[in-house]
Image (tube, rainbow, N blue to C red):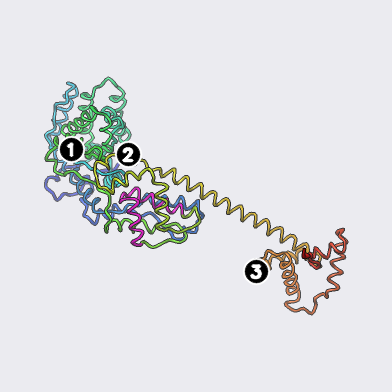
Amino acid sequence: MNENFHQAVYREQVIKEYQNHPLIEALPEIYSKSDVVELLSYYPFFDKQEREFDGQHRLHLIQRLFNIFQVLPAHIDMESRISRLIRQGYIGRNPLNPMYASTMIQGHEAILSKSNTWFNQAIPRSFTIIGPSGVGKSTAVAKILELMPQVVVHSEYREREFNFTQLVWLRLECPHDGSVKGLVNQFFISVDGLLGTEYFNKYGRANKLSVNTLIPIMTQICRSIGLGILVIDEIQNISLRGSGANLMLNFFVTLSNVIGTPLILIGTPKAMNVLQREFRQARRGSGQGDMIYERLQQDEYWRIFLEAIWQYQWVLKPVELTDEYVHVMYEESQGVIDIALKLFALSQTRAIATGKETLSSTLISKVADENLKLVKPMINALKSGDIKSIAQYEDIYLPFDEAMQTERINLEKTSFVKSAKQINRSSDTKQLKEEAIFRLNLLGLSKESAKRAVNQVLEENQLTDLQQIVKKAFQASIEIKTGGKDDNVKNTKDDLRNIVKTGKEQGLTNYESLKRAGVIKDFKGVS
């Protein structure tokens, strides 16, 4: 069995309408509010020690922010609606009911007659979710759908053979050109990918088939696979074509009426006027109502969201969430979750790249001004609260990847300069050590003893003056030899003789030997 398939497990149903219905009984239990909070909430792994990682690694860790899912009241409401919608949609479509076989026959006859006039007797149930881009509509729906298996395989129901493959949910995107045929072909391709069927090759490639012919085919497929709910996202795309908008809306209405499968339409305010004028009138009494998915207000829920993400700070000096941060984050994002997350991520990236390693309200505002220029019109529209103004900016582009790339380059420059300086310092230190060892060697110390003494001095002191290094290293070598006593220390005359003797062996004059050993210092006269 495909790993994405789930063997049906039937659960006893409390609600009478849901009893003796294998497609409903195979669904997960109806969750309580606390269950929903626990199941939907997601907080990625975080370890404070990760703050000690180098900047490049921390840029990767910051991406975890976009996996956080903080459950809010709107999510609980949405889960409840979808839960009711899918179960209510199944009531009139029980494969064990004799009427089910009858409707399958009617659907087949409709395909043969190339007619789409046959309607399902079940009441169409659907609802629309409207909200600005970035508020989390699609993400929330996706998370809720994932609480249910997408494909359920039935083989036996109550000691009775029952071979049936149930597609619980399917999500499609409205084509950018508002094409009905494009949406139907996307349906064929998606179903084929999930179930291993060949519907696209059989029907989708036949470009001569009209929309009126494709609708009965799509209807029959939906019934044969027990499609529980159909989600169509990005419905604002229907407004891109004048006549195409009405064609697509009529298709939605027909789809809901003919299939009897509940629809969830997701879109931005740009599609609201068309939907209110056309689609809503065609589906009165749907039961679930439409959902305006608002951005967060600056209230306790906004603070709950910020508290959830605020602990994910990878800067070396994290800051506490104060009222000042609550306010500045709202001012710059207007409660749009996507913008808030990206602003928080970019602010941390800037803090790491510049070496400041801490957040501030000034930094956050500066990052917003520099990196969120393209969404400023949308932010201003949101501040105004005018739906028409907001609708103009639903497709606005937030160049997050480009902004991250810029910050990454800045970090690389900073890291390179830092590394170069460290290399230079290391090179300077190496030259100092070699010169100090050479001078100590002139003073009569073996190379090993001189090296040991110089390393000891440099470990204990941050010295850059050669004379000081030689002096302390020579003293340290004496203490090492004598255990801290100076009774066996060579007198100055013997030291000078050794310096001159060693210098001659290396081809140096007496003056050059004594000067190199630090005995003779450069004289700087007064001009």
Indicate the amino acid at tag 3: Glu
The residue beneath circle 2 is 395
Vertical arrangement, residue 447 with respect to residue 268, above or below = below
Q: Earlier in the sequence, mark 3 or mark 2?
A: 2
Estimate the x, y position of residue 35 in percent, counting from the top left: 25, 55
Q: Residues within 10 Å of mark 1 (few under 14, many from 20)?
A: few
Residue 300 seen in the figure? yes
- In the rendered structure, the answer to whether residue 255 lies left or right of residue 207 reads left
Q: Main secondary structure of the magenta part?
A: helix
Q: Quadrant of the C terminus?
A: bottom right
The residue beneath circle 3 is 460
Vertical arrangement, residue 254 with respect to residue 310, above or below = above
Indicate the amino acid at tag 2: Asp
Q: Residues within 10 Å of mark 3 (few under 14, many from 20)?
A: few
Task: Return the residue nearer the eye: 462 or 366.
Answer: 366
Estimate the x, y position of residue 277 in percent, counting from the top left: 17, 35
Residue displayed at 48% across by 58% down:
356
Task: Return the residue nearer the eye: 302 or 182.
Answer: 302
Q: Quadrant of residue 180?
A: top left
Estimate the x, y position of residue 361 in percent, counting from the top left: 39, 57
Q: Earlier in the sequence, mark 2 or mark 1?
A: 1
Q: Earlier in the sequence, mark 1 or mark 3?
A: 1
